[in-house]
Image (spheres, grey):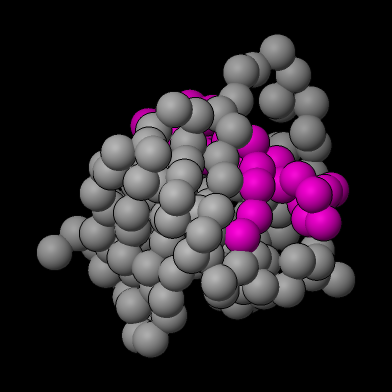
Amino acid sequence: MATEIERKFLVRDRSVLSGLAGTHIGQGYLADNGMTVRVRVAGDKGFLTLKSNTQGLSRAEFEYPIPLSDAEDLLNGHASLGRLTKVRYLIPVRDVTFEVDVFEGELDGLVVAEVELGSEEQDFPRPAWLGDEVSHDPRYRNSELAVSRRVPA
């Protein structure tokens, strides 16, 4: 079983993205009954992901590449639990990489950085462009954002 251990932060200073190339992502949610089932189109690649409920900062995660045409069909025809779009930027900082998502559409203005860790206790750098931590706030989960379609206040 794969385990995802993730910390999530708002981004205080977007200038860190200046000059970086990002990947456009469309994702939607197909099911949520203890395991969230997500389909994602990232650039020219498709993925199907299953995630368990979070325990602390950890959860089971299973991600599989799928044909792009299948991902597009699932996203456009079956994502009945919500959809969202964003551009993802990868920013390496020492021994970790932050994934910075700039949300689009109704979520425009929301910028969130995530960092995946090897353990819940792992120390990691906190660059000055990071803002408040929102790891434990369910309103910032992508699955919640796709349903609410609004930036949390």
Q: Nearer the viewer, residue 98 or 62?
A: 62
Query: In the image, residue 92 lies at what x, y percent?
Result: 48, 27
Q: Is residue 70 left or right of residue 19?
A: left
Query: Would residue 67 appear left or right of 9 to someone viewing this image?
Result: left
Please provide percent x and percent y for residue 101: 63, 43
- Where's the N terminus, which quadrant? bottom left
In this view, the residue in front, 68 or 5, is: 68
Q: Quadrant of residue 81?
A: bottom right
The answer to whether residue 26 is magenta is: no
Residue lying furthest bottom in this view? 33
Q: Is residue 152 above or below residue 127?
A: below
| Residue extending farthest left | 1
* Residue ID at (79%, 26%): 15
Query: What residue is drawn where x is 56% and y is 29%?
Result: 23
Task: Find the magenta span and give its range.
Answer: 83-110
Q: Is residue 134 visible?
A: no
Q: Is residue 82 among the parts visible in the rendering?
A: yes
Write down the quadrant of residue 88 in the picture. top right
Q: Which residue is at a point 80% across and 37% down the rendered structure image?
A: 13
Tell me if residue 106 comes above or below residue 152 in the rendering.
above
Left or right placement of residue 76 versus residue 49 in this view: right
Image spot of residue 51 (x, y percent): 34, 68
Residue under the image location 44 percent in, 69 percent down: 30
Compared to residue 55, the image places residue 30 above or below, namely above
Q: Which SS type dominates the magenta stretch?
A: strand
Q: Position of residue 45 (x, y in %)?
A: 39, 33
The answer to which image quadrant residue 61 occupies is bottom left
- Is residue 101 a member of the stretch shown in magenta? yes
Residue 63 relative to residue 55: left or right: left
